[in-house]
Amino acid sequence: MTTTIDKKKYLELLDTADIIPKTIETEDEYDRFLAVAQMLMHKRSDRTPEDIALLMLVVKLIEDYELIHHNLDDWEKSTPNELLRHIMTASGTRNVDLIGIIGSSGVVSEVVNGKRTISREQAKSLGKFFKLSPALFIRSRCSPPSPSSAESCRWETRKASG
């Protein structure tokens, strides 16, 4: 299904965000694109098709820049709980915001602090809440890449997002 984007609204959004959709070349541009991504992430339920399109583009440009300029090996080794904490910080989400999304205040605290693993159901709920793939919250359960673990990692990721 293709979403229809209103060109005028999209251009107005670009003007408001004060960015030009192009390859990120400097840390200053990177910081500006991160700020735009955070602004769009904060909108959550108010996101328009134009917001979603711009968010997807900005995230892709950020990822491309990070692949070249930042060492992301550490993120690939991060646990889902560490990624959750990072996403919460980047989006300004507090523990209290997740109460009822993934459980009681005690469960939220344990999950955020890494004392409890994120279940498949919680991963789905977090994916829906943050408008991200649930696989992000379970992908690190797989051991470091090896021929025998690779298939189980792909299986677990497919199953969680389904």
Image (cartoon, rainbow, N blue to C red):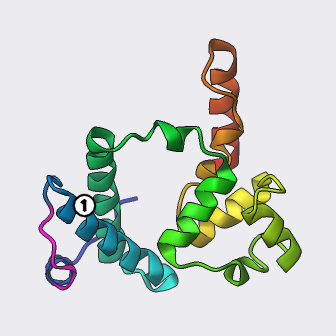
2 lies above or below 161 = below
Q: Is residue 86 shown left or right of residue 50?
A: right
Task: Point out residue 147 in the picture as x, y percentages from the top left corner.
Answer: 62, 13
Q: Taking 93 as reference, is 138 left or right?
A: right
Query: Image point 76% across, 56% down: which residue?
Result: 114
Q: Residue at x 32, y 73 (%)?
A: 35
* Among the 4 quarters of the image, the one containing residue 64: top left
Q: Nearer the viewer, residue 134 or 61?
A: 61
- Res 142 quadrant in image: top right
**Local SS, label 1:** helix
Image quarter (top left, top right, bottom left or bottom right) of the N terminus: bottom left
> Residue 77 at x, y = what percent?
58, 38
Residue type marked 1: Tyr
Q: Is residue 68 magenta?
A: no
How many marks are shown on the rendered structure? 1
Q: Residues within 10 Å of mark 1 (few under 14, many from 20)?
A: some
What secondary structure do most residues of the magenta stretch adopt? loop
**In which image quadrant can residue 16 be found?**
bottom left
Q: Which residues are magenta?
A: 16-21
Residue 46 is left or right of residue 139, and the answer is left
Q: Nearer the viewer, residue 154 or 6?
A: 154
Residue 162, can we see it? no
Where is 2 relative to 117, above or below? Answer: below
Q: Which of these two is toward me, 66 or 103?
A: 66
Residue found 69% across the figure and 59% down from its top = 124
* Mark 1, residue position: 30
Q: Position of residue 39 (x, y in %)?
A: 37, 79
Q: Position of residue 99 (x, y in %)?
A: 77, 80
Residue 99 visible in this rendered orientation of the protein: yes
Q: Along the horizontal axis of the image, is 81 left or right of 58?
A: right
* Residue for point 53% across, 39% down: 76
Could you say which is closer to the camera, residue 132 or residue 91? 91
